Amino acid sequence: MYKKLLFIAFLIFVSILIFINDDSKVIIFGIAIFLIGMFFMEDGFKIFSGGFLEKVLQNSTNNLLKSISTGIITTSIIQSSSLISIIVISFLGAGLISLSGAIGVIFGSNIGTTATTWLVSLFGLKINIASFAMPMLIIGVIFKFISHKTLNGIGYVLIGLGFVFLGISYMKEGFETLKDGINLANYAMEGYLGVIVYVLIGMFATVILQSSSATLALIITALATNQIIYINALELAIGANIGTTITAVLGSLASNENGKRLAVAHLIFNAVTAIFAIIFLYQLEEVVLNISEAFGIAKDNYVLQLAIFHTLFNIIGVLLVVPFTKKLVEFLNGLFIVEKKSIYTRAIYLEMNHKDVPSVALNALTKEMDRLYDSSIEVISHSLNLHRHDYFGKENLRKIVLSNHELIDTDVDDFYNKRIKYLYSDIMYYATIYEENMDFEQKNDVAKIKLVCRDLVEAIKDIKNLQKNLNKYIDSPNKNIKKQYNKLRFNIINIINLLEKLKDCENEKDYNEKIIKSKDKLDKLDYIKNRRIDKLIRNNLIDSNMATSLINDSKFTINIAKKISNVAKVICLKRKYL
């Protein structure tokens, strides 16, 4: 809802600007081109990184210093703090990183965003940056149409950079043209009234544009063309930082509790940083001047001084908040706690924001598939009147089957409705949503997960059909029918046991071959196909009712064992994404 309101407000604002002054169209066009470039760059890095970015973030957040450094480096390169935030929130939801690690990345990301200021200050205004845009756009478009993932991603990045450079050029040109008719510097305000006014302007500009990078590019080009004075530019930069927080908080309203906690952390960090910068604005201005003199930067080079200021107050913000990170984590963990009273098992790792990070989405799907498998094996084992710990990892399964014949009271329908049905539904729903942003290989992996989950659900329905006669004949005085049903039990748990060993072993080939051999032997359970039922009837070993039950139940057993064995196809996926 808030996005629609922002869009309407932005549309009205743009229309008024264009109506009031025709020259402002060039600036607005420059902003639009810049924003398009940022979107292309973000999409390009998603494709280009091929999961590498996610691996870097996951493996570099085990302590606070590494988390902050990772946030600085990745955001400086990618120039998209929103993309970093999306990945970090997804990692939090999937349990891949700690809240402390996520907070560290966000802290570092704030410093990383200052790279945009440096890029525009150092290059965007001193050279004809638009001349670099054309070759980037041409090469980018060529790469975009090449059916190679890496080149395709590079193409998007080049197109994005081309548009960013073009946008900066148009903004600069627009302000230079605008000053002939309107000089915004005439509206300059000094003192703390000016601080409040310009901080608010910077804040609202960022909320409307949904990009602090675009706001800062706008501030720098306006400053370079003397449309605003230096002190007001500093105040606008502070406002831009606050604006990114408001955008993050609004975006988190539809997020899960982890997204909300991270948004609160971002809010606290930016609030502390902004308050410090506002209170000590004039002292920081002096520090920036001293730093500029030390590096030989001219006193009137306000553009580079703005870049120094923007970096300085973000670094100070990190230094102010980092010592209290542990207390901050404790505080955040106490927020947004949802009391779950449902008796139904639902997905706990699947979240809508994972769709933007395919590797995390697949990680979450494999975890939920594992939960579905565990619950399925539990109800199947109990329906066979066995506990999983009775046979997991054991060797003499026939002996175990013979020594366990006491009935375990298991209501398969109730178990399915409470522990399986809604979890399965969640997996299938989110799997379909996640596929939207995936490549061919990832979609293939999702299809395998969906098929295995369907097989597990069908195996549970088959075990319900087998259970009735199994409970009837497992302790029958007729030793022959009892023996046949114990064979059915053995064949099912043999497959399950092999799968458990496959999950933990390093030599997959050996256990995969055993599973294939066991599947091949299952056809021998078909009493009609192998004419085994004839022998049992002719020799009066079982009666006709027993024969009919055995014929039907052998088919259920074959189906159950084969469907469970299909889990072997996705065990490698678990190692790939977990």
Image: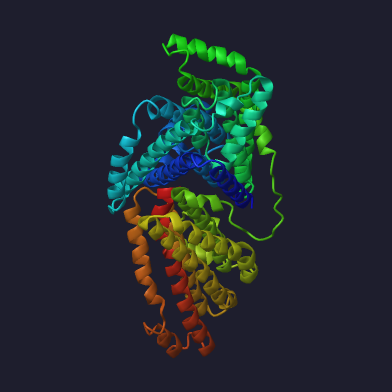
Q: Say which of 87 and 301 sits in front.
A: 301
Q: Residue at x 64, y 64 (%)?
A: 418
Please indicate whether residue 166 sits to the left or right of residue 22 in the image: left
Q: Residue at x 46, y 28 (%)?
A: 117
Q: Position of residue 481 (x, y in %)?
A: 51, 79
Q: Say which of 29 and 363 sits in front.
A: 29
- In the rendered image of this protein, does residue 354 appear above or below residue 270? below
Q: Residue at x 61, y 18 (%)?
A: 281
Q: Position of residue 7 (x, y in %)?
A: 58, 49
Quadrant assignment, res 461: bottom right
Q: Position of residue 63 (x, y in %)?
A: 51, 29
Q: Residue at x 45, y 36 (%)?
A: 174
Please indicate whether residue 223 sits to the left or right of residue 443 in the image: right
Number of marks drawn: 0
Residue 438 visible within the image: yes
Residue 494 visible within the image: no
